[in-house]
Amino acid sequence: MAEDIVKVELDGPVALVTLNRPDALNALNRALRAEIVSVFNELAQNKEVRAVVLTGAGRAFTAGIDLKEAGQTGFALGADEDSKSIDMARALRDYPWPIIGAINGFAITGGFELALMCDVLLASEHAKFADTHARVGIVPGWGLSQKLSRMIGISRAKELSFTGNFLDAHTAERWGLVNRVYESDELVPAAMKLAHDMCSSQPDLLKQYKALIDDGYGMNFAAAMKEEVKRSIAHADSVTADAVEEARKQVTARGRDQQE
């Protein structure tokens, strides 16, 4: 029996999603893209899951679009999708809970873009990022040209995108692309631990907070500040003094535990 090209393992409220075409460096052919979309759509409907860790099997997170298949079939690239069933950007953008990218190896071009669709990035010491759009001759369509410059600065983003050179994990950490770098065998456990930590926050607030940050990201600063005030006022009507006091006790106790 053939192995699933995307593996899903549930650990309480956290789903570990593993891209599983290791012999092809998890290249994003149509089948894999469709399965990623299907998995995230299903997880969005799962009321028990409140965070996802996304990683790859083998030496790569994903090497990006399967150019061998593209050369043979001429299928749509980047934003030129012909069906929602293979629109990964939409599926991950619409997923309401945190997505932690555990970047285990190569994240190249479309694979780099998939990484940038995650909310938080952690990396193994063997992770390498590269944007080869300019060398392959494809204009990015999954957000790389806009997201990368906002994360690491426009000058650094231009250097990476105009050269296609690799960015190693430790430099990516210094530049603010990834939050932390781990030994290979520590990466997924660390990502799972972080996901569980996020899930210990109030579920409704966690979902609302992600939406607020993401929606504000697409606005100018003044508009985003107004949106925050608007949503804060709307949410305040549902908050009781007793609930705040109970939450205060829990937060205080957690803070003490973290200091010990």
Image (cartoon, rainbow, N blue to C red):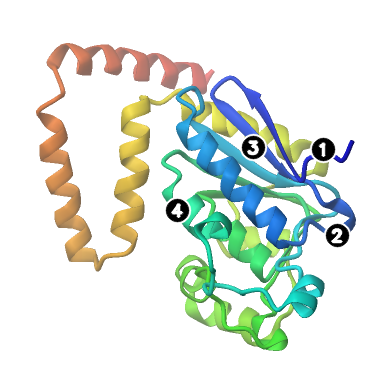
Q: Tell me how far mark 1 sits from mark 3, CA to CA.
A: 11 Å
Task: For the residues labelled 1 and 3, say whether their Cβ atoms are less than 8 Å apart.
Answer: no
Mark number displayed over residue 93: 4
- The residue shown at (14%, 25%) is 238
Q: Nearer the viewer, residue 145 or 23?
A: 23
Q: Nearer the viewer, residue 248 or 190?
A: 190
Say which residue label 1 marks: 185
Q: Residues within 10 Å of mark 3 (few under 14, many from 20)?
A: many
> Where does the image place residue 131, in percent across and percent down from the top left?
66, 75
Q: Is residue 52 above or below residue 78?
A: above
Q: Nearer the viewer, residue 131 or 71?
A: 71
Looking at the rendered structure, the kind of residue marked 2 is Ala
Q: Is residue 191 above or below residue 93?
A: above
- The residue shown at (24%, 65%) is 221
Q: Residues within 10 Å of mark 1 (few under 14, many from 20)?
A: few
Which of discs 3 and 4 lies nearer the camera? The answer is 4
Q: Quadrant of the N terminus?
A: top right
